[in-house]
Image: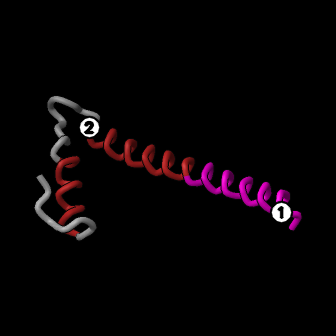
Amino acid sequence: MINHPYGSPEFYSELFGDILADVDPKTTPNSADNILKGFYLAIDSWLDYHVDQALAFSTLKANVKRALGD
């Protein structure tokens, strides 16, 4: 359970702490590499999402301008 205000450094420290607790070279030798790769995958996923959203808004704007004869 997170006991700090949302968005505070302490809030994120607890989230990162949960992830870092998974580093265990004995039971999961690639855990540290997998965490880093997962971080990159998450960044790529969010970037793809926002690029898609930006394109959708560009299309919406073009359609609205066309509909309004602007």
- Most foreground residue, 2 or 39: 2
Judging by the rendered image, the residue that carries numbered circle 2 is 31
Among the 4 quarters of the image, the one containing residue 65: bottom right
Who's the residue at 24% across and 65% down the image? 6
Label placed on residue 40: none
Judging by the rendered image, the residue that carries numbered circle 1 is 68
Find residue 55 and report its horizontal and vertical position in percent. Answer: 68, 53
Find residue 60 and report its horizontal and vertical position in percent. Answer: 72, 55
Q: Magenta segment range?
A: 50-70
Q: Is residue 35 magenta?
A: no
Who's the residue at 17% across and 57% down the image? 14
The number of numbered badges drawn on the structure is 2
Q: Main secondary structure of the magenta part?
A: helix
| Lower sequence index among marks 1 and 2 | 2
- Disc 2 residue type (three-letter): Ser
Q: Around disc 2, counting alpha carbons within 10 Å, would you say few (fewer than 14), some (14 to 19), or many (20 or more)?
A: some
In screen coordinates, is 3 left or right of 13?
A: left
Q: State which quarter of the image contains the C terminus.
A: bottom right
Who's the residue at 74% across and 60% down the image? 61
- Secondary structure beneath disc 1? helix
Find residue 34 and report its horizontal and vertical position in percent. Answer: 33, 39
Q: CA distance from mark 1 to mark 2?
A: 55 Å
- Disc 1 residue type (three-letter): Leu
Among the 4 quarters of the image, the one containing residue 29: top left
- Most foreground residue, 68 or 11: 68
Q: Is residue 52 magenta?
A: yes
- Residue 43 position (above or below residue 38): below
Find residue 40 and report its horizontal and vertical position in percent. Answer: 44, 48
Among the 4 quarters of the image, the one containing residue 25: top left
Who's the residue at 38% across and 48% down the image? 39
- Most foreground residue, 31 or 42: 42
